[in-house]
Image: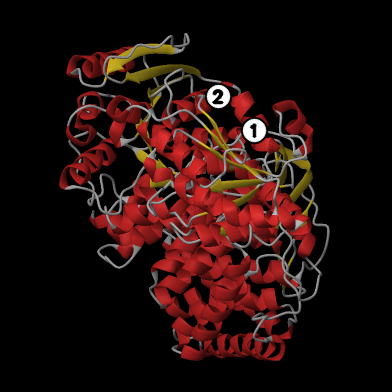
């Protein structure tokens, strides 16, 4: 895959004074410093009658009311061979009714468009809904900064789930400092400081914070409230400084001249960060619930401030779980009480600060830029969407094409004429570790699965080679599969582990039913039946689970094998028994601790229940999987697989690292199995979240996949991805992707599911 070379960003730009201009400039700078460092050209929107001394990267200026300027900008982008255009959308910055003039630009673009929606209205006007629908339809993907935005786009605008990316508002990388270090510099030494920053306008609720100050001063007499920021330019044009003067008069009438300070200036980022760093409590007393994004809230949170806010959408998400304080709208008494509590309770305030700072590390502009780069790459490899595509509420492309394409180059590179290698050094196969039946079985499972989900699957010759390795691994003397083979083709053991035997049976069971070759189906069924005899003596729950997964397919294709059906009941009852012995209301699991491939235990019971008709098996599988997935979802909503450092610990919440692709693949399979057993959009959401983990929606915002080769990094360490790309990882990613593509086809016309909505439009 060629790197992103040229990017066009359409929006406002500094020195224009507005939040969109600040965001555009920050995003551009972060992308310029990224690992890709594309050449970036900015198309800047000018408000009527204004001219700005733009920086050199602003290549085109568009008067918001001049249609010819929009058309000229489209010509510049098309002629410039840009890879992607990134639109910053806000209704007020484009001309025409509801900003509709922007379609004069978008309708002519011949490059993928990734649109960042800075506002998503719950109750738009008819014109706003129509124009936003056109913008979304013209876009390959849309970005929102909060999960509430995704929810509204789906429920109110009918946008397909796969078309929406959630990327939090970026924050600068800034140290965690004590306020006193900057108070002296800014002239507020020794004073408790409360701060609000932003362009001044009536929807900011400043008057209610002023009304709260007398109550705060009764408990903290030296407190000061600083209102930092110029009046919004649009308000200046319409009313001058009338609103600011009203606020000043209000503070004067309450006797607050020495405790409320208005700093009427538009500050640069360095100055802003100093002011935020100085404050003890940051306040956003906004009056509208539908505030989807607040850059000032993100910045203050990212600097580790104790934040008190009204419960608008962005604040509710960012300040959840005690990371800040929410108070009712327009309630100065509640606002004052909470601010005073934090100013006087140093222990609580500092603990809140520390939690906020730690929680915000995934939001730095560096991480935000990485997420945008992933979104740009996905858009570049999706079918191009044009402005005459179906309007919002209908899908422009089916879900299975919105998913990344299946690429087998790295998978093929990991194979030689013997079989599938275990490990790699970076992307180069590492022969020193040889082969194992585990990975060859996984690879055969993938080869069988993609036969019905990809235009081009695993080559027939390679599939036959995988089958031959498994056949050679069979040891008829021990009735077990060997596992490890050195590069010089010497088996290193007579019998492999119970888990590797069970996993091989799983692959054989699937192969016996769905392989495209009739002869290979007969081979797989015969070897499956022969190798099944050893399993009843096994003691490993995962070996039972892997075997059950194979039995579900084998029994469907070979219903006359009563011994296989009997063993299916035996193994399922064993899992039910250990679940009943270990399960408590707080620990709904089969074992005292969590280990690897966890979701396969739940999946095997779900599939066994569907195969045998035993509802109790399905119920137990769903119950345990729901519990597991709740543990594997981080506070920020991303998939967080059970880390390998958790293995062996008893009844403890899982540690976050190291995170491995195997767990994500297992979660995808199990959740899709759950959805087939009990259709529920939440299962598809969990599966999507697990797939998104591969693509950058994870704790490090790091994409693990090379979309051109299909290679996959070996996991996430606390500070970085593991750059090696071994056999288990590439198969895990491709298998998870293949199952998601198959699910997109299977859901067909199921309009109750996310994928069904995508397919139907």
| Residue 124 relative to residue 424: left or right | left
Front residue (pair 188, 696):
188
Q: Is residue 45 above or below residue 157?
A: above
**Which of marks 1 and 2 precedes in the sequence?**
2
SS assignment at label 1? helix
Tell me the quarter of the picture where residue 440 sits.
bottom right
Front residue (pair 513, 97):
97
Which x, y percent locates residue 480? 73, 72
Which x, y percent locates residue 605? 55, 80
Q: Is residue 248 above or below residue 644?
A: above
Q: Which residue is mark 1?
A: 275
| Residue 449 relative to residue 176: left or right | left
Q: Are marks 2 and 1 in contact (CB under 8 Å)?
A: yes
Front residue (pair 698, 235):
235
Q: Is residue 732 above or below residue 55?
A: below
Q: Which residue is mark 2?
A: 267
Front residue (pair 376, 450):
376
Label 1 environment density (alpha carbons within 10 Å; few <14, some 14–19, many ≥20): many
| Residue 337 relative to residue 687: left or right | right
Which x, y percent locates residue 274? 67, 30
Q: Is residue 165 visible?
A: yes
């Amino acid at each position: 895959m060629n790197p992103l070379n040229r990017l066009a960003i359409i929006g406002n730009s500094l020195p224009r004074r507005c939040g969109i201009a600040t965001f555009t400039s920050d995003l551009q700078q972060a992308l310029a410093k990224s690992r890709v460092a594309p050449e970036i050209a900015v198309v800047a929107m000018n408000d009527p009658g204004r001219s700005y001394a733009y920086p050199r990267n602003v290549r085109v200026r568009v008067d918001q009311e001049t249609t010819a300027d929009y058309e000229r900008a489209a010509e510049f982008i098309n002629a410039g061979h840009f890879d992607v255009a990134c639109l910053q959308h806000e209704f007020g910055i484009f001309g025409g009714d509801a900003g509709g003039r922007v379609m004069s630009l978008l309708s002519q673009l011949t490059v993928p468009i990734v649109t960042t929606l800075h506002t998503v209205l719950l109750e738009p006007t008819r014109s706003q809904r129509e124009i936003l629908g056109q913008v979304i339809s013209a876009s390959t993907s849309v970005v929102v900064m909060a999960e509430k935005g995704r929810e509204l786009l789906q429920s109110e605008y009918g946008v397909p789930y796969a078309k929406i990316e959630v990327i939090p508002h970026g924050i600068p990388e800034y140290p965690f400092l004590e306020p006193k270090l900057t108070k002296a510099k800014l002239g507020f030494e020794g004073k408790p400081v409360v701060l609000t920053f932003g362009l001044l306008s009536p929807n900011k609720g400043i008057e209610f914070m002023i009304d709260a100050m007398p109550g705060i001063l009764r408990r903290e007499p030296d407190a000061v409230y600083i209102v930092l920021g110029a009046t919004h330019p649009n308000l200046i044009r319409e009313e001058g400084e009338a609103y600011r003067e009203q606020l000043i008069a209000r503070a004067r009438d309450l006797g607050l001249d020495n405790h409320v300070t208005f700093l009427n200036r538009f500050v640069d980022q360095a100055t802003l960060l100093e002011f935020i760093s100085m404050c003890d409590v940051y306040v956003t007393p906004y009056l509208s619930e539908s505030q989807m994004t607040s850059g000032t809230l993100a910045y203050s949170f990212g600097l580790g401030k104790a934040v008190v806010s009204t419960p608008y959408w962005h604040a509710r998400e960012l300040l959840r779980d005690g990371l800040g304080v929410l108070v009712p709208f327009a309630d100065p008494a509640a606002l004052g009480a909470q601010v005073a509590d934090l100013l006087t309770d140093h222990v609580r305030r500092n603990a809140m600060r520390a939690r906020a700072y730690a929680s915000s590390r995934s939001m730095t502009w560096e991480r935000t830029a990485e997420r945008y780069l992933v979104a740009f790459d996905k858009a570049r490899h999706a079918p191009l969407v044009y402005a005459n595509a179906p309007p919002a509420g209908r899908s422009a492309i089916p879900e299975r094409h919105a998913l990344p394409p299946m690429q087998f180059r790295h998978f093929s590179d990991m194979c030689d004429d013997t079989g599938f290698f275990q490990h790699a050094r970076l992307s180069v196969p590492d022969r020193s570790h040889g082969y194992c039946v585990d990975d060859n079985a996984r690879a055969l499972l993938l080869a069988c699965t993609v036969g019905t989900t990809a235009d081009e699957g695993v080559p027939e010759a390679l599939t036959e080679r995988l089958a031959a390795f498994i056949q050679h691994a069979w040891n008829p003397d021990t009735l077990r599969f060997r596992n490890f083979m050195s590069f010089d083709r010497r088996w290193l053991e007579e019998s492999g582990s119970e888990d590797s035997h069970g996993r091989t049976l799983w692959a054989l069971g699937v192969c016996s039913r769905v392989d495209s070759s009739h002869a290979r189906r007969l081979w797989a069924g015969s070897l499956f039946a022969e190798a099944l005899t050893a399993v009843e003596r096994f003691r490993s729950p995962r070996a039972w689970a892997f075997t059950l997964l194979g039995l579900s397919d084998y029994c469907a294709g070979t219903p006359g094998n009563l011994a296989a059906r009997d063993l299916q009941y035996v193994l399922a009852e064993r899992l039910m028994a250990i679940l009943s012995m270990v399960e408590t209301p707080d620990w709904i699991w089969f074992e005292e601790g969590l280990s690897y491939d966890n979701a396969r235990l739940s999946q095997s019971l779900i599939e066994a229940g569907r195969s045998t008709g035993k509802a109790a098996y399905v119920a137990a599988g769903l119950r345990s999987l729901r519990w597991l997935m709740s543990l594997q979802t981080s506070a920020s909503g991303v998939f967080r697989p059970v880390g390998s450092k958790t293995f062996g610990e008893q009844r403890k919440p899982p540690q976050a690292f190291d995170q491995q692709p195997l767990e994500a693949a297992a979660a995808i399979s199990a959740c899709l199995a759950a959805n087939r057993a009990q259709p529920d959009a939440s299962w598809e959401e969990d599966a999507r979240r697990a797939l998104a983990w591969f693509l950058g929606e994870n704790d490090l915002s790091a994409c693990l996949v090379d979309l051109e080769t299909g290679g996959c990094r070996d996991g996430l360490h606390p500070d970085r991805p593991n750059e090696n790309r071994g056999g288990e990882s590439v198969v895990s990613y491709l298998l998870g992707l293949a199952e998601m593509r198959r699910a997109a086809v299977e859901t067909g016309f199921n309009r109750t599911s996310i994928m069904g909505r995508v397919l139907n439009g």
